[in-house]
Amino acid sequence: MRIAIIGAGAVGGWFGGRLVETGHDVVFIARGETLTVLRDRGITLNDAPPVPVPAVPALSEAGEVDLVLLAVKATTETDLTGMLAGLGEGVPVAVTQNSVEVPQLVADVVGTERTWPGVVRGYFHHTGPGAVEFHGGPISYTYGTWDGSDDPRVDEFGAALTAAGVDADIRDDIFVDVWAKAMFVVSTGALGALTGAPLGQLRTRYRDSLAAMMTEIHHTALAHGVPLEPTAVADTLAFADRMPAEATSSMHRDLVSGAPAGETELDAQVGAVCRMGDAVGVDTRLHDLLLTVLEQRGEQTPLG
């Protein structure tokens, strides 16, 4: 299986680097300084020596591939149509973004039959062009076909991931996990960015607010017909309790560092929950409030 990875940031860099290290055929799609670093030095994982990797500036220059792993951040500036130009006939796109909207946005470009929604778990930090660090927690990718139908490439990709040290969890109800992940990452990312607090404080000092945000997402998912368990909020809080106390999400870090809101995942994560709630008449007032406040802060000065 030949795999094209669009994006060499935290997730794409780690997954791609580990796949190459374990002998799999990977080509990175990257731009600017990252492309130069990948070509000249390779990808660096933690403090290990760089791993040489092939890299090109566009999918259309990657040659024939069997699968595309879409691993760029979802921002208001993300051009999915441009990124996926040159996608071969029948080639699936595996989604990794922390957004309840991105699977549909990808499907709008390539069709649901070629869109594999997915969820990444693990604290990966993009520390510079072509450099990624792992900061604890699980290393997993849960994914599946849009409608749960069989595709032998799903299992083939899972075997490659497993060999690369990534727990591959293939599900026929993948949207349940997409929303379950959103319940964790959107709530902790937005509340963390607002307060400047890492996960250890969010799950203690701000626990009631965190639970209230998770409940809004739970209600929204149910209204969209996604059968999350009645215990989903409690289960997500319990998961948060097991994660590293110092953990922060990439959206949290971007917003706290002063990145313009449009260059972060704020709209794709928090804005998506607001829009999905509006579409089915679910009250998402906490997400609405945090979206407004964080957008305003993103246009002002860094938080710290």
Image (tube, rainbow, N blue to C red):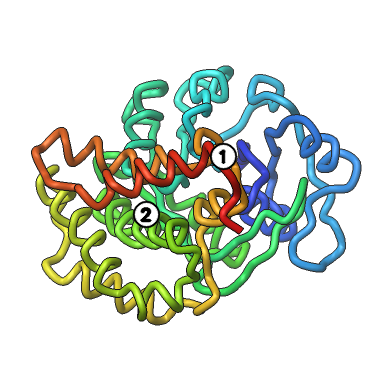
Res 59 quadrant in image: top right
| Label 1 environment density (alpha carbons within 10 Å; few <14, some 14–19, many ≥20) | many
For badge 2, the amino acid type reads Val
Mark 2 secondary-structure assignment: helix
Residue at 52%, 28% in the rendered image: 78
Q: In this view, does 55 lie above or below 217?
A: above
**What is the secondary structure assignment of the residue under circle 1?**
loop
Residue lying farthest right?
A: 40
Q: Is residue 8 among the parts visible in the rendering?
A: yes
Whether residue 70 is visible: no
Q: Residue 72 bears which disc, if any?
A: 1
**Looking at the rendered structure, which numbered label has been put on residue 186?**
2
* Residue appearing at x 9%, y 39% in the figure: 281
Give 205 or 57, whichever is nearer the viewer: 205
| Residue drawn at 70 percent across, 38 percent down | 27
Q: Position of residue 66 (x, y in %)?
A: 56, 35
Indicate left or right for 168 with 180 as reference: right
User: x%, y% of residue 97?
Assistant: 45, 45
